[in-house]
């Protein structure tokens, strides 16, 4: 009987990772410009090089034949990890759908254990719907919380409608987060667990969307921030993410066009819209954008170990305990309203 082993890779294993090539799937977020913005081949080349050097890799071997891997990224102080890649197949192991699911579930369960031990609360992965990788994630306890639609295209010059947007300030973070709370379903908010720093454009900030050189633009209204547009130019194509009040949904293309012009970005871009904003896709399609990809966002909640400090308590030895001494209670008894109290012992 074949023996499946899941473990951390050795130096020799890292050299053999290039042989695991039958199935390779990216699990990164659609707003990750380094993957979503680049071509598939370029992404695999960069990922293979990082796997050879990175430490955040788990491998699976069947009878010492390296046949699967999982690449993950440790999160920041917000206690979240992100799965990056899954791979399966080797010269002697045929990674059929059933085999790939078995290998990947074992790797994912080990990743969950590692995340829990390190104190991580959530692990995120983004995959194609109705795919082998989604079934593997489901069997490993990952739950889908929404879908994301990626639209690709470009705006013609002169689209600007004088929408009064401006560059985002640090003081806007709280208002942007309130906009997120108003426009995002509660189930998605619980899964993502974002705080205000998720919208910062500071290159030194720690956030799930951040890429160096990220641009942020907002549309102020009387009630705060009505729309927020963020642009990550780090990949082959800039990635655009949006938050927008329902009352401003009809001008979303103009908001994006203005933001791109203010950021001096021309050419093709990718716009990421969640499924709960699916009604806002058509305005972009009318401007020539194409629906290019659909991804399912999944999350796995871990059971992080709680460290409790011992509380000192005084322990009384049985031999040191003293018995209580009974005492007669002395109470005051009033005979009537005008008489003095009877203070006799009872």
Image (cartoon, grey):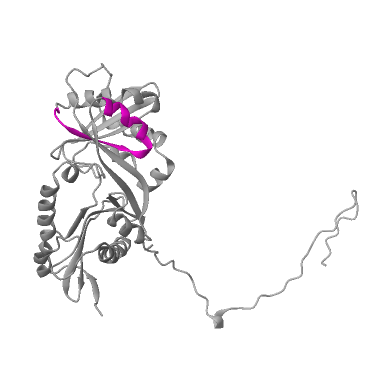
Instruction: Say which quarter of the image contains residue 341.
Output: bottom right
Q: Is residue 46 above or below residue 315?
A: above
Q: Residue at x 35, y 57 (%)?
A: 138
Q: Residue at x 37, y 26 (%)?
A: 224
Q: Is residue 23 above or below residue 185?
A: below
Q: Please tell me which residue lies in front, 306 or 147.
A: 147
Q: Please tell me which residue lies in front, 156 or 318.
A: 156
Residue 342 appears left or right of 301 = right
> Number of numbered discs present?
0
Q: Where residue 267 appears, x then y in whole percent?
A: 14, 29
The magenta stretch is: 265-286
Q: Quadrant of the N terminus?
A: bottom left
Q: Where residue 36 appears, x then y in whole percent?
A: 19, 43
Q: Where residue 295 appears, x then y in whole percent?
A: 29, 45
Q: Please tell me which residue lies in front, 104 or 225.
A: 104
Instruction: Say which quarter of the image contains residue 20.
Output: bottom left
Q: Please tell me which residue lies in front, 58 or 20.
A: 20
Report if residue 193 is visible in the image.
no
Q: Residue at x 21, y 64 (%)?
A: 95
Q: Is residue 26 above or below residue 234?
A: below
Residue 220 appears left or right of 92 = right
**Residue 269 on the magenta span:** yes
């Amino acid at each position: 009987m074949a023996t499946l082993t899941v473990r951390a890779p050795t130096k020799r294993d890292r050299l053999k990772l290039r042989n695991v090539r039958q199935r390779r799937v990216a699990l990164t977020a659609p707003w990750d410009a380094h993957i979503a913005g680049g071509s598939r081949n370029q992404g695999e080349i960069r990922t293979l090089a990082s796997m050879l050097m990175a430490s955040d890799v788990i491998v699976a071997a069947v009878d010492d034949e390296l046949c699967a891997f999982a690449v993950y990224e440790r999160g920041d102080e917000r206690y979240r990890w992100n799965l990056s890649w899954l791979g399966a197949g080797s010269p002697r192991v045929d990674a059929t759908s059933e085999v790939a699911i078995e290998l990947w579930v074992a790797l994912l369960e080990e990743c969950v254990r590692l995340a829990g031990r390190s104190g991580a609360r959530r692990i995120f992965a983004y995959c194609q719907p109705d795919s082998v990788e989604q079934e593997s994630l489901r069997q490993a306890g990952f739950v889908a919380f929404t879908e994301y639609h990626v639209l690709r295209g470009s705006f013609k010059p002169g689209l600007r409608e004088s929408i009064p947007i401006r560059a985002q300030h640090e003081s806007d973070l709280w208002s942007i987060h309130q906009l997120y709370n108003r426009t995002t379903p509660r189930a998605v908010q619980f899964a993502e667990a974002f705080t205000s720093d998720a919208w910062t454009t500071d290159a030194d900030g720690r956030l799930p969307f951040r890429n160096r050189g990220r641009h942020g633009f907002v549309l102020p209204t009387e009630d705060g921030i009505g729309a927020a547009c963020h642009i990550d130019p780090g990949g082959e194509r800039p990635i655009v993410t949006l938050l927008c009040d329902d009352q401003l949904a009809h001008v979303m293309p103009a908001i994006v066009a203005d933001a791109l012009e203010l950021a001096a970005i021309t050419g093709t871009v990718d716009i990421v819209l969640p499924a709960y904003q699916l009604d806002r896709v058509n305005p972009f399609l009318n401007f020539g954008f194409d629906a290019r990809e659909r991804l399912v966002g999944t999350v796995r909640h871990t059971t992080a170990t709680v460290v409790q400090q011992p509380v000192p308590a005084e322990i009384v030895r049985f031999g040191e305990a003293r018995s209580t001494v009974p005492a007669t209670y002395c109470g005051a008894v009033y005979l009537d309203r005008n008489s003095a109290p009877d203070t006799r012992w009872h």
